[in-house]
Amino acid sequence: VEARLAELENTATGANAQTHRISQQEYVTRLHRLNEDIANAWLAEDRVNALKLCVKVAKLLGDTKVGKFYPVLFVLVTEVIETVGRLVYDRILRKSEESTSEGGTKALPEDFKASRVRTVAKNTCRNWFYKIATIRDIVPRIYMELALFKCYRFIQDEPPTVQIRRLMKMSRGVADPLAAAYVRMYIAKCALAYGCETEDSAMTLEILKEFMPSYVNVLDETADEDPATAYIFRLGLRRTEYSELMDPAMEWLIECCATNPNPSLLHKVLYMGGETPPVPFLRAVFRSLSPTVVRENALKLIALVGATSTDEDSLEHRDAMADCYRTLVDKFDVIAPNEGDRLAILGDVWRVVQKWTHVEPYLRVAERFLLYVIKYLAQGELETLMKDVARHVHAHLAQAKEREPTKSAELPAEAMRCVERALRVVTDQFRDVDYLVSLKWYVYLGEILGGEAKVKFSAALLKCGSSAGSISDPMCLHTLLEAARTVHDDIDGMSSEESRAEAESLVVDFINNVSFAGDFEAHLNFLVTARSAFANLDMAQEILVYHAISLMTSVYERVGVEHTNKTKAFVNACTAYCQITIPSVRGVNVRLQLFMLTAQAAIVHGLIQQVDGLIRSAVTDAQESGGETAVGGWIDLPTDRAGAEMLDFVRRCSALLVVQPGNLEKGAFLVFRGLMKVVEDFDWEPSSADEVRAYVSLIPMITAMAQETIPFKIDGLQSNDVLFAGEEAYVEEATEL
């Protein structure tokens, strides 16, 4: 264990940092082994060795060189010594069993008196305390006696108050402030557990009163000659860091006092901090106070924090003040502040906070008070608060730009996360994206975000937009498009399937909610922009094609086949958009379906050449998507599903070829022969009838084309029965097929 402590003293970085982490784990492992050794020694009735091992463990709390590991060490060590305390108590209890008239024994009742304890048990109990009294080191001496405190029941009926006071006096001899803090806390814990505390918490208050001078000296930058300073410097810590190690002990003591509803106790505790209590002390007090006490004394407590502020405050000091304000406002989530104090609470805090030039502590306070304002105050206060946030952020970025003109100014990571969380709170509160993007401060704060914070904010904004329904406002559309682009750009090859699915859902919802109120050209322009913006999301590309097809359908519903040059050019552009976009969609079954839907939408507009290109592209895609190396090919689908998808494509394509005019130069059945080749080459499931069904589905198509008049036509479109009417070669080829 001493070797491990030597490693922990090494404050070098790099490889030594790894040694620091490993040594802590070894430290814990060693403690567990010592605990097992103690248990084994006890089972072997080697009480002396068990006690020696336990004292060895307790000695570890006398050396604070482990630094930030000390609070963990305290928990581990006290668990070990308390286990020994229970073993000793149980052994003495068994020796205390009363004799019966039959020659046996019976256990003592739970509320037994010392007078009923057998003499041999009392002597054993005293012997254990005598052994503890021989321990020379003061820290293990105190801890070991406290671990056996329950055993005083065997030799006295009254609570061990005298012994507690004796140990309190002994604790004054512990020079190390950190070790002394935890010793005093453990004394208070045992005093509370064994009935030594009074109704007015006098014992805990007395312990806290002895604790406070060392705590204040630790925080005093001018107390270089104080003996405690040597312990601080030995660990290589700042005073505030060292005091934070003492905070758990002090907070526990204050919390014990705070459970007492007597308001005078709060004043006594605060008085211990002096005329202007140190902020870390106030932070510990505030954490321990009940929400009810905070509500009744809110303005007084806020004034205590504000009284510590000066224009020359360090970042550490303002961080501690921010902790105090955040702790207080968190209490108001549990119990609402008095109605008459609500605005005054915000005003008193902001008179201090708005002067801060350090952006991180300022934003930490603003983030928490944002919830307070939303919950208890009006929208005007919310606007004022967030405008002040934007002002502070802008000032920080401007100063950063002045210091380093060549670098892009940005907020520190923690400050950026605070802004992001604040914006998400506002977004969730209003759920009106049109209103939100009209707020200049909201848009500004959203724009200055970066990295993960911007992604989270963008996702929240998109969720807000999807719940709002139709999106038509240009400003709102632009803002949401940038948010969707941010979410998309965060997805890469290393992203999880869950992250990709969430991003696709947000982007697709956004695309579906966009509305241009009949302005087809603006809608198509948006689809073109979105195609390049969301290139990595297959679902988004698929939805964009559906929207382009929907535009073609809407034009047909409006003008039918009576096209103007403008409408003809527009449906041509939509068709070209689909033909360009579809190949980027992963999944051959989806691509073939989109090719067919686009061809069906285009053919009613008389776009013969475009339809021919779409059908050929589909047939080529179906042919080339076989094999193991094809990306997004048939191999990605289960065999039975692949067969069903191919059968569906053959049927759709066959129906379309009935009305689609054939190629006058290369023959009417050029595409049909290509489709047959696809059916022949496809790897059909041997046990499935899909291959037979595919061939059978070609028969109605070829027989329909062989008729003098095909069964159905499209207005304004000349099909093969007109183009090849009377040509014997056409009939012969159809008959041959």
Image: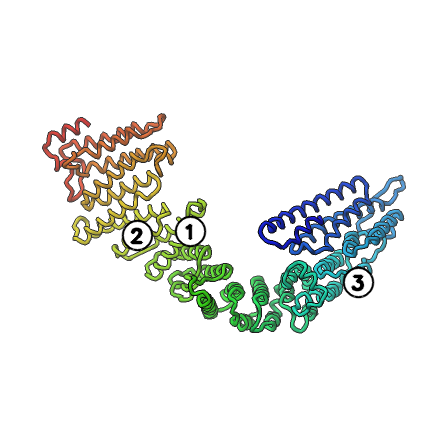
Residue identifier under label 3: 169
Residue at 25% in and 54% down: 520
The answer to whether residue 403 is left or right of residue 566 is: right
Residue at 31% in and 34% down: 646
48 versus 644 height, above or below: below
Find residue 404 and report its horizontal and vertical position in percent: 45, 65
Cβ atoms at labels 3 and 2 below 8 Å apart = no
Find residue 576 and report its horizontal and vertical position in percent: 24, 47
Residue at 34% in and 57% down: 471
The residues tagged by marks 3 and 2 sit, at their Cα atoms, a distance apart of 80 Å
Q: Nearer the viewer, mark 3 or mark 2?
A: 3
Label 2 crowd bin: few (<14), some (14–19), many (20+), radius 10 Å = many
Pick whichever, 403 or 54, lies toward us. Answer: 403
Cβ atoms at labels 1 and 3 below 8 Å apart = no
Residue identifier under label 1: 490
559 versus 688 height, above or below: below
Label 1 crowd bin: few (<14), some (14–19), many (20+), radius 10 Å = some
Q: Which secondary structure lies at badge 2?
A: helix
Pick whichever, 488 or 510, lies toward us. Answer: 488
Q: Which secondary structure lies at badge 3?
A: helix
Q: Earlier in the sequence, mark 1 or mark 3?
A: 3
Find residue 248 and report its horizontal and vertical position in percent: 66, 59
The answer to whether residue 650 is left or right of residue 58 is: left
- Residue 527's disc is 2
Q: Which secondary structure lies at badge 1?
A: loop
